[in-house]
Image (tube, helix red, strand yellow):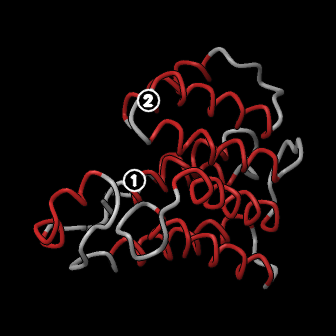
Amino acid sequence: MDIGWTAVGADLDGAPTGETITELCDRIAQTFLTAVGASSGPLYASAFRSAGAAVSDRLDLDGEALAAWIGAMSDGILARGGAAPGDKTMIDAWTPAAAAAREAAAAGRSAGAVLAAARDAARAGMEATSGIESRRGRSAKLGAAASAISTSAPPLPTSHCGPCAQRSLRNDAALGASRFFHGVSASCG
């Protein structure tokens, strides 16, 4: 995944500043497909394409649109990968994150509060995988040994998420929020 985020960063350095979030998500999706092998590239490409489509060419995301974006990220991963909650995959972080984001948005919370609710739920979902046996992905090959692997939460990339929320999540929201969720979901498997 580091290869993918490095490639995305390099690609975005030359990106037009007026891109919509949909255009930005399409750009990130294509970069992941090109740069990242195995299943992560296609999974994140599907997630970003779904998320971009969900926000319909917006330039910024309010709480409701951010919840739709996070939900579509989760849906894109689910549709492409076929994993289910409890499989000890990134879905164990994305599914509760999407639900918490929708709930926070329905309560009229700000974009920053929606993102924080999603973050907290993603962390809780990731931590809940501790002690369960992987049923999909590389860690499934380890069988019961994988359940002993620590799933402590990674450090939060607040340098990416905080500024995004504070700037009304304009254009770089997709990158900042997804870097956070990558960090959480990478610990699930």
Q: Which residue is mark 1?
A: 183
Q: Which residue is mark 2?
A: 36
| Amino acid under disc 1 | Gly
Instruction: Give left or right: position of 2 versus 17.
Output: left
State if disc 2 and disc 1 touch (CB < 8 Å).
Answer: no
| Amino acid under disc 2 | Val
Q: Which one is earlier in the sequence, the residue at label 1 or at label 2?
A: 2
Label 1 SS: helix
Q: Nearer the viewer, mark 1 or mark 2?
A: 2
User: Residue 85, percent across and down?
Assistant: 47, 74
User: Residue 108, percent across and down?
Assistant: 82, 80
Name which residue lies at 46% across and 23% down.
Answer: 35
Of the pair 180 and 125, the residue shown nearer to us = 125
Assign the C terminus to one quadrant of the image.
bottom left
Name which residue lies at 65% across and 60% down.
Answer: 75
Of the pair 34 and 110, the residue shown nearer to us = 34
Quadrant of res 87: bottom left
Residue at the extreme bottom of the image, as rendered: 107
Of the pair 37 and 82, the residue shown nearer to us = 82
Find the distance from the CA under tag 1 to the CA under tag 2.
Answer: 16 Å
